[in-house]
Image (cartoon, rainbow, N blue to C red):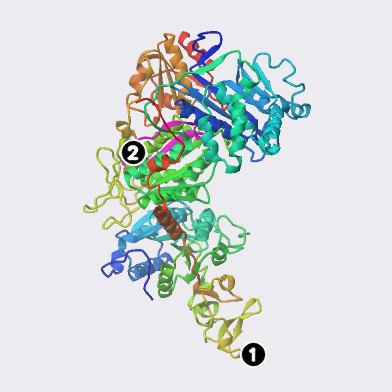
Amino acid sequence: MTRIINSIEKSEVELTKKDFKSNLPVKWCPGCGGYAVLSAVENVFPKIGYRKENFVLVSGIGCSSRFPYYVNTYGFHGIHGRATAIATGIKLANPRLSVWVITGDGDALAIGGNHFIHIIRKNVDVNILLFNNRIYGLTKGQFSPTSPTGLITKTSPYGVLEHPFNVGELVLGAQGTFFARVPDNDVKLMTEVLFEAAKHDGTSVVEILTNCVIYNNNIHAPITSKENRDENSVTLRPGQPIIFGKNKDKGIMLKGTELEVVKIGENGIKEEDLLIHDPYQKDPGIHMMLAKMWYPKFPVAFGVIRSALYPTYDDLVEFNIMMDKANSKIKNLEELMLTNEVFEIGDE
Amino acid sequence: MNDILEKTDKKVKVYKNLVIKFSGDSGDGMQLCGNFFGSAAAAEGYIITTFPDYPAEIRPPQNTIDGVSGFQVNFGAQKFLTFGEKVDILFCLNPASLKVNLKWLHTESLLIVDEDSFTKSMCDKCGFTTNPLEDDSLNNYYVIKLPITTYLKKLSEIYKFEQKSVLRSKNIFILGIALKLTNLKKNYVEGLITKKFKENIHQLNKVVLDEGYNYLEKNGIDLKYEIRIEKPKLSRGKYININGNTAIAYGLVAAAEKANLTLYCGSYPITPATEILAELSALRYLGVKTLQAEDEIAGICSAIGASFAGALGVTSTSGPGFSLKSEALGLAVMVELPLVVVNVQRGGPSTGLPTKSEQTDLLQALFGRNGEAPLVVMAAESPADCFYSAYMAAKITLEHMTPVVLLSDGSLAQGSELFKIPNFNDLPPIKLKLADPNKKYNPYERDPETLSRFWAIPGTSDLRHRIGGLEKSDITGIVSTDPINHEKMVRLREEKVKRIANYIPLQDVYGENNGDLLVVSWGSTKNVIRNVVHELLEKGKKIGHAHFKYIMPLPKNTSEIFKKFKKIVVCEMNTGQFVFYLRGILPEFKYYQINKIQHVPFTREELINNFIKIMEE
């Protein structure tokens, strides 16, 4: 991990996990994927190194959105779907805060879909942790915008008819500059990815495949379980060829305009023929293909899929205000009012 | 109110105030003409109000009813100047504008038309079956028919101007006539022409202005009477002509400057509130931050976020957008952060009448949220008052840590009046409720006087805390579903808003402090009603007028005032929303009501007749 360089003030003392422990009891179900995220956040915040007062956690509604209560930072538990809008206001009002949105698949992609795509489009420097358990948990088991077609839930007793969102596809479609995906059973990878998200200037979306033990148990198991993980997922590393499989003998190759799973050694394919992952490239085309890879045809991509550098909205706002202030002859409201057509009239 | 004060001799008509309206097709430049006229009147020390009246469509078909554009100026010495109910001088540049505006002209009053435009096809286009200049339909008016188009064509030959350009300056020509008729000098307008027009048309427009100014005299048109308008007594100062939306933007900037905070406005464009966002967006150089959000909800939510982060959060909207903001307004009530929500009311329900004015969102502002969600509701009274109302809304939200809804309306938003630039030092101080970082911070610990909680701004050492929309424990702010605590918190939030009555001015009464009839009103109807009350007072009636700016909470002395009158009548541009509220909180009084829902103001006759009827009942 490298050092993060930006205008957010660093802590003078070294912080630890303890500095972010909240004294409130965590009320998630035993086995909930949320615990892993909590642990990763407690790991990564001291590593990021900002003053602990500069972290702000913002959430909407849902199981995941209780998160701010469980971390000792400034926290705002908002209303359903609106965390990204609230976070936008916080970041614009004070760009020297490190703002984190904690949201879920229902909160961010259904009721908050509009705010989600627009914060991404504007590229506001906010980190979004999207807990994707592919179900509504807090309302007790209704299908969400990421529930697989056919899923039987309380409100889809005959199976879901809809086609689910792929979070990465939506993020990139909204011109996202950062997208990463992690499973909830790899805290180490999650910690690394959250650090990268913090380092990225602009909106970073980290999709966390979380398990809901009660309403959608093992929904991610075909990708994330011990037995399936090697074959059905791949962790991307910048500058590295994309290799996966139990025996590390499979890879992803770009053939023509499509990705393809190939076996190293078969048909003369060598490691050098594989696609080298470049999360920093500006063109999102290959990132989109990587984000869309899904089992059983492809391994599901983990790690940072895209991290492209574009100006952030909050920086543009600050920069323009600074320049305009410096260049303006009008320094206050009174002077502004006098730029109107002024009538100096009346009796003494 | 267009009293002719005296007829000193047969040839002079003295007006306390005069209403003049310029109307024509939307391509005729009526807005500019009216604006220049208003400026000329203000420059000579008159009080003015101006009101534009233009089509909702961007490019309506030419010379049709839909395409009529008008601009009205009311000026004179009258203290309570309305936007002008009926017109004393009406200019019509085409038949359609006559069709639309004749109903506003006082009988016997002056109507000046471009007779060249009253061709058969033009008359047909707007539904006149016969030429109104030739039949007897205008017999009750003092009509002056001028061949304006022909005359301008002649001018282009004499002065060697391009004919097209001269015809485009019809508005400047009638402006010249209007200045002369009302005894205003033309040099101020000449200055405006130099300042606002491209250099290549300066000379042309000055010539046309001069020709208009001298036209009547030169052509031997002798008016039946000379018009004189009284001059007001104004306190010396620098004045600007300001509309309600700009005044609100300025008032918010003033408050942020006074409180030394960043002003943040998150809004979504909506008629007739958009100019507030537009005005603020232009003020980057003063450090104002704006966000044109993806929707109304994001606008208010981002403003709440900005307030949480230590800015003065503001959102502006109109009725339909206000509905969308309801849930977030409840959140603001719960987290007890500063937030000003400006609702520039328009005709409803639903999309309703976007460009028209109504007072129909009062109950929504008071009660339109889930749960017990009290907040402060204020209403601006005039375009200039929008500045002070916005300033006070910001002061209250910052000092009492509660959202404030400021109601304006379409007529205030579009209408302008003269506004004296205030001395910044004279604006009341704003004391922030900042948390003390040297004390243990409890998010819901309250100031014992005001019951407001303290603002702990992210980034401050030792004040880390969590707040949100879930019910909180008293003092600690920890999430709680405890029944006793919930009732306590509901009552605390209510009491906090009620106690604001201790910090707002007492209600004043214009006219008699006790008597037969108290007229009660709120919002943009103030001056219309006040003029009528003034007239009745002069006739010796025992009448008073209480116009409310603070609606929730009501001023402390409201009940005391009501007690002193035999009868109370509440006048509103709705079916009776304020009176419904008053009946709920002050049920010991009997209320009469006068209501109008026609998106035009009350008329003098409507009010006088009703007031007298109620008094005599």
Q: Amino acid at mark 1?
A: Asn
Which of the pair A170/A298 is nearer the observer?
A170
The residue stretch that appears in magenta:
B399-422
Judged left or right of residue A81, residue B437 is left
Instruction: Using a 10 Å C-alpha cutoff, classify the residue at mark 1 as few (fewer than 14 neighbours), some (14 to 19) or many (20 or more).
Output: few
Residue where numbered disc 2 is placed: B424
Per the image, is B417 magenta?
A: yes
Q: Which mark is residue A267?
A: 1
Describe the element under mark 1 as helix, strand or loop: helix
Work out which quarter of the rendered image holds the N terminus of chain A and state it: bottom left
Q: Do the residues indicated by labels 2 and 1 lie within the same chain of the protein?
A: no
Which percent across, then down, holds residue B599?
56, 28
- Image x and y of residue B470, in percent: 39, 49
Instruction: Note whether B225 is above or below B423 in the view shown.
Output: above
Looking at the picture, does residue B238 appear above or below residue A215? above
Secondary structure category for the residue under label 2: helix
Residue B424: image quadrant is top left
